[in-house]
Image (cartoon, rainbow, N blue to C red):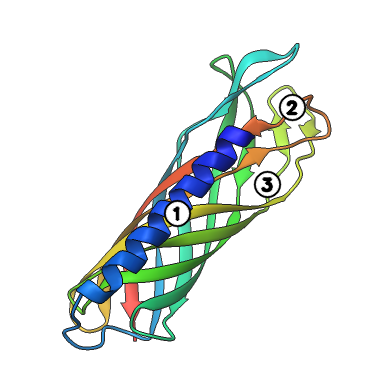
Amino acid sequence: MLRKTTRLYSALITVGGTAFAALPAQAQDGPSYDFKLFGGAAYVSPLSDSSLSGIANSVEASREVGWEIGGEWKPSDRLGIEVAYFDATHDVEADGTAIGEISLRPWNVSLNFHLVDRDRFSWWVGPTVSYIDWSEVELNGGGSLAVDSETTFGASTGMTIGLGDSFAIQAGLRWLDASVDSPSLPDEVSVDPLFASVGVAFRF
């Protein structure tokens, strides 16, 4: 837990420091947008696994593709407040064998610092607060394991490439300090998902 917390704080310090250092250096070429709606696909790669006493040496979630939708409001040229929802279903693997499925369903709120904010290209970084509504683990042999929802933190970065005044291609990376905690399991299972997303955005 200490190692995970240290990684989280290091990521947030790096993101925040880079943002504030770069803000005065960029010049605007005109307003980009006030509101943005976006959607697309994301490839999710869990970065961690855990051992469970008496169960398995390594329990982890599989890499999967899910979908994401969201929106951003920009109260100023450099600051955006983003809300996004993601959904994907993962295999739960114990020592390399799938034993069930679980759905990862986070609601993410991000504070986006726009280092570059132009119609044709925009790039931002920032911290994320996430509420993850984990589903139950549906076991392959029948039955299920209840899983607690969690509120956690992370960091994100993203960019848009404008295709005119309103439409854009959007891509991004997001990392969450997340784990699966079930009353039926002796320990938490670390997940720490990294999301690589690509989609389209409508700006206005």
Quadrant in the rendering for residue 156 = bottom left
Above or below, 68 against 23 in this view is above
The one of 115 and 134 positioned closer to us in this rendering: 115
Q: In the image, residue 116 lies at what x, y percent?
A: 24, 71
Q: Which residue is mark 3?
A: 134
Q: Is residue 199 visible?
A: no
Q: Which residue is mark 1?
A: 13
Q: Which residue is mark 2?
A: 187
Q: Are marks 2 and 3 in contact (CB under 8 Å)?
A: no
Quadrant in the rendering for residue 172 = bottom left
Alpha carbon separation for disc pair 2 and 1 = 29 Å
Of the two numbered discs 2 and 3 on the same chain, state the one appearing first in sequence: 3
Q: Are marks 3 and 1 in contact (CB under 8 Å)?
A: no
Above or below, 5 against 76 in this view is above
Of the two numbered discs 2 and 1 on the same chain, state the one appearing first in sequence: 1
Q: Amino acid at mark 3?
A: Trp
